[in-house]
Amino acid sequence: MITKDNYKKSIKPYQPKPKYFRNCIKAFLIGGLICSIGQGLTVFYMEVFGFTSKEAANPTVATLILIAALLTGFGVYDKIGQFAGAGTAVPVTGFANSITSAAMEHRSEGLVLGVSTNMFKLAGSVIVFGTVAAYIIGVLRYLIQSFL
């Protein structure tokens, strides 16, 4: 009888060895490139429109979301993700990619029951987590400041 452990041992010689170092370098470079593009957009909004760094943050994030959604729609972001792995999980663009992918996957079910519902299944949990985390951090900050 083949057990789970025996099976794992028997297939181990046939499994490719993961290339951790190379994968980390690719993720670092592509993630850094995405962040550099974001910094470039921030500088662009500051120079062209005269925004402060705080004011330039919102249009920068909106532009990164738009670019990630368009690249996902054209199938380019998936190819970048296959190459870079975790490097494309930079929070803003990775989140935009996952929501756009969910919307595209269920578009045949209609706009409301397909696109909207499935798109916000993922977004809902992220928004709830962010709200709860922000509340907890706010309470902790208030408590720390009131005792100091």
Image (cartoon, rainbow, N blue to C red):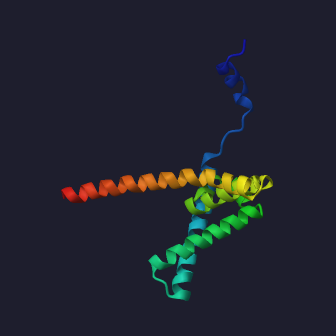
- The picture quadrant where one finds residue 28 is bottom right
* Count of picture labels: 0
Residue 33 in the image: above or below residue 142: below
Q: Residue furthest top?
A: 1
* Residue 94 seen anywhere in this rendered image of the structure: yes
Judge from the rendering whether residue 109 lies leftward or rightward of residue 62; answer left or right.
right
Residue 105 position in % (x across, y down):
75, 53
Residue 25 position in % (x across, y down):
60, 56
Judge from the rendering whether residue 64 lies leftward or rightward of residue 113; answer left or right.
left
Q: Residue at x 62, y 50 (%)?
A: 121
Q: Quadrant of the C terminus?
A: bottom left
Judge from the rendering whether residue 94 lies leftward or rightward of residue 115; answer left or right.
left
Q: Quadrant of the N terminus?
A: top right
Residue 41 position in % (x across, y down):
57, 77
Q: Residue furthest right?
A: 108
Residue 45 position in % (x across, y down):
55, 82
* Residue 83 seen anywhere in this rendered image of the structure: no
Residue 117 in the image: above or below residue 15: below
Q: Residue furthest front?
A: 112
Q: Residue at x 57, y 59 (%)?
A: 90
Q: Residue at x 51, y 78 (%)?
A: 56
Q: Which of 111/29 is in front?
A: 111
Q: Which of 34/11 is in front?
A: 34
Q: Residue at x 49, y 84 (%)?
A: 51
Q: Residue furthest left?
A: 148
